[in-house]
């Protein structure tokens, strides 16, 4: 992976590093006492698969297509063309720009800063992309990247201007220190935790509470219906990684994996009928896997080897679920 410049890191992370180093020294972390490689801390694909939990409403779906659970038998098979529309990282300790993960700012567009969280997200995606694409393919799902699904000016405009709708969630739709998505891609600088080439389509999460997992009509309809149709794909995928800092070490703690698509059953849009749905949501937590260290001049070392196991396990779980629920032949 191409190395990015660590510029601007000393100014922005000085205060955070002082606090985290002090805490690290006063309460020694087991991970710090017995350092493991990223891959060793993650374990095998089977180890990871056992720890994945459903992150979605699991009530019985209605064949009429109403309610917050999709009637997947109407699909007949897993969605064929799945667009990866956002891949990003979050700092569980703080979403302020002073976090070791947020060492640069950029406009909310398809380009990102060449340092900070952009490096982290891009490094993880580079390590996991082949496994993610290949494993989804085993279940009949073709993973598409922006260079594939943004094949017209109309689609590029739709993607650039798209906003995740989260109305009715109040404070849950916001995170401390992170501005709301701007009306256009040309306004309002914000932290850059997104992989290179992708938009930051942030799903709300506050203190471990994820509204998307509990069923949110605005989120499901905006992503599963509006965006999927605008890009002319069968479904869209968002993956985000929650990290934290312990001293100078950055650890991967959680990975969240969500596939959205249009309501499989045609109907009139009413309060009980959602035009879009969360097809499958997965959560992998408590990883405690160190993969990056920071120093006074920025990123000191990084190791993403093993992340492909995470993507393999998540894609296998998603594919198995969709194949079973849609009644697809194996």
Image: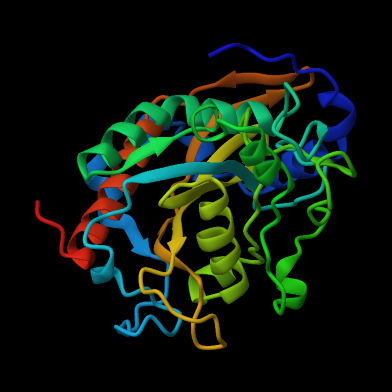
Residue 31 % position (x, y): 49, 40
Count all numbered tags in the image, as a single digit: 0
Residue at image position (44%, 60%) is: 261
Residue at image position (37%, 73%) is: 70
**Vertical position of residue 202 compared to residue 127: above or below:** below
Residue 278 % position (x, y): 45, 65
Camera-side residue: 159 or 43? 159
Q: Is residue 194 left or right of residue 73?
A: right
Residue 288 % position (x, y): 47, 45
Residue at image position (70%, 37%) is: 101
* Residue 246 in view of the camera: no
**Vertical position of residue 114 compared to residue 40: above or below:** above
Camera-side residue: 104 or 287? 104
Residue 96 % position (x, y): 81, 48
Q: Is residue 211 left or right of residue 297?
A: left
- The residue most toward the left is 330
Q: Quadrant of residue 187?
A: top right
Q: Quadrant of residue 205?
A: bottom right
Camera-side residue: 156 or 311? 156
């Amino acid at each position: 992976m191409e190395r990015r410049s660590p510029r601007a890191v000393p100014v922005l992370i000085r205060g955070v590093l002082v606090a985290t180093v002090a805490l690290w020294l006063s309460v020694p972390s087991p991970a710090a006492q017995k350092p493991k490689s990223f891959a060793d801390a993650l374990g095998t694909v089977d180890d990871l698969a056992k720890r994945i939990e459903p992150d979605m409403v699991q009530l019985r779906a209605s064949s009429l297509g109403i309610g917050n659970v999709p009637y997947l038998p109407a699909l007949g098979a897993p969605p064929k063309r799945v667009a990866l529309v956002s891949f990003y990282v979050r700092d569980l300790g703080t979403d302020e720009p002073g976090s070791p993960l947020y060492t640069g700012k950029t406009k909310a567009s398809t380009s990102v800063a060449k340092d900070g969280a952009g490096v982290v997200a891009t490094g993880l995606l580079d390590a996991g992309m082949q496994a993610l694409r290949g494993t989804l393919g085993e279940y009949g799902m073709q993973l598409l990247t922006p260079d594939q699904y943004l094949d017209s000016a109309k689609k590029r405009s739709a993607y650039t201007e798209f906003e995740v709708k989260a109305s009715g969630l109040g404070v849950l739709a916001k995170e401390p220190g992170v501005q709301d998505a701007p009306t256009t891609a040309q306004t309002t600088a914000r932290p850059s935790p997104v992989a290179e080439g992708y938009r930051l389509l942030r799903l709300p999460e506050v203190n471990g509470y994820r509204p998307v997992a509990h069923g949110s009509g605005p989120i499901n309809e905006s992503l599963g219906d509006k965006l999927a149709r605008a890009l002319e794909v069968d479904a869209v995928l968002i993956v985000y990684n929650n990290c934290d800092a312990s001293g100078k070490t950055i650890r991967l703690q959680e990975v969240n994996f969500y596939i959205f698509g249009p309501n499989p059953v045609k109907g009139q849009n009413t309060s009980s009928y959602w035009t879009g749905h969360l097809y499958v949501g997965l959560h992998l937590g408590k990883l405690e896997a160190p993969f990056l260290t920071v120093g006074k001049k920025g990123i000191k070392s990084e190791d993403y080897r093993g992340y492909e196991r995470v993507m393999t396990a998540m894609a296998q779980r998603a594919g198995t679920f969709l194949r079973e629920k849609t009644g697809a032949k194996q």
